[in-house]
Amino acid sequence: STPVVPGDLSWVPLREELRGASPYGAPQLDVPVQLNVNENPYGPSPAVVEDVAASVARAATTLNRYPDREFVELRAGLAAYLCAEAGVEVGPAQVWAANGSNEVMLQLLQAFGGPGRTAISFAPTYSMYPEYARDAMTGWVAGRRHDDFSFDLAEAERLIAEHRPSVVLLPSPNNPTGTALPHDVIGTLCELVGDTGVVVIDEAYAEFRRAGTPSALELLPAHRNLVVTRTMSKAFALAGARLGYLAAAPELCDALRVVRLPYHLSAVTQATALAALRHADELLGRVEELRAERDRTVTWLREQGLEVAESDANFVLFGRFADRQDVWQQLLDAGVLIRVTGPEGWLRVSVGTPAEMQAFRSALTAALDTTT
Ligand code: PMP
């Protein structure tokens, strides 16, 4: 497999800002309990597998041709899904998609960032954001959240006035803390940024939000500079297919068509995603269970005397450990892979099946016994 740490690149004519950089990514280790990249632990049923395979087989009959560059059917399917999930009106012209929301986000930076422009986010947050900015040659400013990881609007107002960012990147719920963004803050940010920038609310984990919490999608009619990104990788249980998407004003989607590579969504990807959308109810069928398991995990971690961040997502950030690397290693030795991420001292666990969470609790109990 590809080494995580690059070899000696000293002779390679790299861009200066890439010198010393490592490829992003959590260790991909073959262990029994994998709770490190916020996947949905439940795989597709045989019926879904059959429909995906049949759809891909149909697409295969014309693989000599390029795929539908505008992925018209998929945009319509995603728009219909958003209407049903969030109870809002979203049309196909307001939807854009790419290979994971990672690629959607890079395209946003390519279109709305660039040399002489600035993107901003608020740490601790998703650590890919500065990489999109770097790769799109965009200036980067990292503000701070409050100590309890809630959003600091006063800090945001100050930094937006100072740096006039053309892209604001904010996940809700936030990764790795799980913190949801208050609804009224989003509208305020859109107004502060105005028409010289876009506000991107990254709703990768939105389907896990608490019942009754609105999606940022509701604010689209009121703010033409608002972009809401989603993914099929998390609640939708389709990480392997690589399909991320967004909803925004049709003009913003048209701007992304300028920077996308031609035919970026393969015929196989489009067929797979369309088949998955036909089975949305089943693929999302475990979300309620995962939410309950998350809440049980938070309660249990608190009972162990640990600090735990409030989570609206399918993962939980907990700590603090004097040596988090040691705790992570002890869990790994017990066959449980979690993630070293977030501020110093904290660890993140994705919510798995009840059996996986039992393995996590046993391994952590043993580790706590040896470290305290
Ligand atoms: N945004 C956030 C906040 C994430 O945590 C992730 C995945 N870790 C992504 C975007 C990207 O997901 P994908 O490319 O699989 O859609």
Image (cartoon, rainbow, N blue to C red):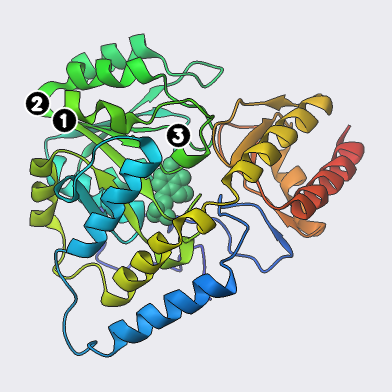
Q: Secondary structure at mark 3?
A: loop
Q: Secondary structure at mark 2?
A: helix
CA gap between label 1 and label 3 equals 22 Å
CA gap between label 2 and label 3 equals 25 Å
Q: Amino acid at mark 3?
A: Thr
Report the residue at 16% width, 65% height from top.
261
- Left or right of 51? Residue 368 is right
In the rendered view, tell whether residue 240 sits above or below residue 170.
below
Mark with earlier residue (2, 1): 2
Report the residue at 41% width, 14% height from top.
152
Depth-wise, is mark 2 or mark 3 nearer the camera?
2
Report the residue at 14% width, 30% height from top.
224
Q: Tell me where residue 328 appears, x and y as whole percent.
A: 72, 47
Q: Tell me where residue 83 appears, x and y as whole percent.
A: 31, 42
Nearer to the camera, 192 or 287: 287
Q: Tell me where residue 40 appears, x and y as whole percent.
A: 57, 54
Mark with earlier residue (1, 3): 3
Q: Which residue is mark 2?
A: 195
